[in-house]
Amino acid sequence: MAEQNTQQDLREILQIRRDKLKALQDAGMNPFEITRYDVTHHAQEVKDNFDALEGQTVSLGGRLMSKRGMGKVSFCDLQDKSGRIQIYARRDEMDEEAYNRFKKYDIGDIVGVRGEVFRTQKGEMSIRAHEITLLSKSLQPLPEKFHGLTDKELRYRQRYVDLIMNPESKRNFEIRSKFVAFLRRYLDNLGFMEVETPVLSPIAGGANARPFITHHNTLDIDMYMRIATELHLKRLIVGGMERVYEVGRIFRNEGMDTKHNPEFTTCELYQAFTNLDGMMDILEGILTGAAKEILGTYQVTWMGHDIDLTPSWQRVTMADAVKNVTGADFMACIGDADRGVELARSVGVDMDGVPHTWGNALYETFDQKVEETLIQPTFITMYPVEVSPLAKRSPAQPELTERYEMFICGCEMGNAFSELNDPIDQYQRFKAQAEKRANGDDEADMMDEDFVLALEYGMPPTGGLGFGIDRCAMMLCGTDSIRDVILFPTMKPLNGVKDENGVNKTESEAPKTEPEKIDFSKVEIEPLFKDFVDFETFSKSDFRAVKVLACEAVPKSKKLLKFTLDDGTGENRTILSGIHAYYEPEELVGKTCIAITNLPPRPMMGIDSCGMLISAVHHEEGEEKLHLLMVDDHIPAGAKLY
């Protein structure tokens, strides 16, 4: 009933606002016909320079965010790009008709105000209005004053409203913009040249990722949206541009979670005649310098940790990092695949589905056991050649490459190489990647013979670095979700997608006017078990309602999702489930599910899965269908099923 009343109230508000607009238009005062308003000052500028501006006439433009009074004297808050300032309007100090029109303006309307800077009797810096001009009529009401726009998903879908209502959201994007500006200035001062390389290419290369595919009608060929800028930038190094960088959009047709969006922004840079050490110095300089300039400090808080960005970050080899955390000494068996795999398994590493080589065993041990422990800024160096197809081998240890990744709070923040410039070695590595792709690995690199040809002309020793702008912005803003630093993040459509797109057409929270008619005629059900289970055995299984607090894709796994669950005990529970083919992580956050909670922990991809989420599985025409069992959100976490 309350919801019906709310909807009725909203309809009335919408109609009233449209009626007000029509009355203005009928009176020849259509606000949408105004093309310009001269703004001389902004709200914060007036406050910062109040003593100099007091008594002077200024003009401001902005949005009405509140109104008080409405008799002979009215107060309202005007919000512009810099902040808010109070507007003081008196009927006897304005044209009476203009004042009466102003009284009918709504919160959310955009107005121009010309008036005198003064301080009220209560001491508040304000503008004494002489003229108030309606510049744009808001036909939609803003969210309720005290609760604002708090629904996270709605904030991402309606960023325009989010920016109006939430100053912290606007601050995030100001910090991001300042970071990109600092980055460009820093690299320009080092003699780098900013360039632009193709977004569309006949080959997707430079990273292990699944690309988006599009079609060029004139050439009648399929093309790929870039998954990295690396190979084109290194062609420029071959051509004699010794220091180049690009800040550009990257597109990867992969899952979405709090740290990943299908399109994101990176900076890649390449410098001739330097190596890995030079790339470490640059990344450290960019992040420490940006923090000091933008935030005024090297100390930041991110993901619940206090981070110290003071220069001179730790630098440690991958093998040493693994030994420090697990005790496993991979350098004692370097190059021995059997001993390496055995050593990894001895410390609890899941090697299922991983090629059995020494390098892969070292990398999986780091990935599953060490990465999450790297809270403070740390450069991890000397990666195995198996996972570094574009990096130069170490002259002293050919099983390793001169590569680093930098980690903060267990998150990779940057990836750099002493770049491979041997065309014969590069060709062999491309060939190995192409074989993986032919065997079904759609994230493996494609063969790029033109890039090999470029290397045959000669590329000098070169250092290369790539890092994500979004993740750096997350750290500087102190936010845990990439969607808080991307103005318009990718979202699942509310009303489904067109048939011809050839993708999952499931609607997301779309309102239904009548019950959906479901065809079960093609459903194939497994036979029921014939063996009975006694009640005492069955009763030992503890089925509980659980709330999904967070959900993300498990790195290096195409199937697993990692759920952080509220099971009612006050301690978060982690369960892994192989349902990524059916759900994206983002759509499960906040849902209420059913889990068995008294199963022993089971290690999966180096993570202990403590229980099992319940799904319903059947087949239709030979294809498996799965639905995660989700129940009424009114059921509290920890509720026991009988």
Image (tube, helix red, strand yellow):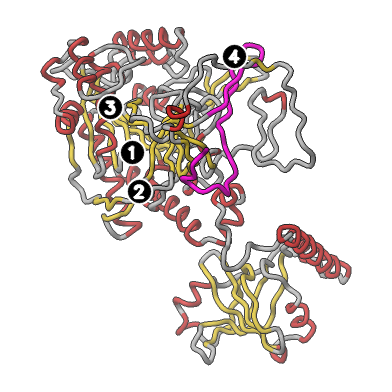
Q: In percent of the image, x 41 and y 10: which residue is there?
A: 436
Mark positioned earlier in the residue sequence (3 or 1): 1
- Total marks shown come to 4
From the viewer's perspective, is the residue at label 2 or at label 3 nearer? 2
- For marks 3 and 1, give the one nearer the viewer: 1
Residue 368 x %, y %: 29, 28
**Residue drawn 29% across the image and 28% down it:** 367
Judge whether residue 635 is colored magenta. Answer: yes
Cα distance, mark 4 to mark 2? 47 Å
Name which residue type carries label 1.
Cys
Earlier-in-chain disc, 2 versus 3: 2
Residue designated by label 3: 417
Q: Which mark is residue 527?
A: 4
Q: Position of residue 107 (x, y in %)?
A: 67, 70
Q: Can you name the residue that lies furthest to the right here?
A: 26
- Rendered residue at 20%/15% (across/down): 342
Whether 272 is among the magenta residues is no
* SS label for mark 1: strand
In the picture shown, does residue 514 fall above or below 227?
Answer: below
Residue with the mark numbered 2 = 303
Q: Say what amino acid the circle numbered 4 marks.
A: Pro
**Percent position (x, y) of residue 173?**
47, 53
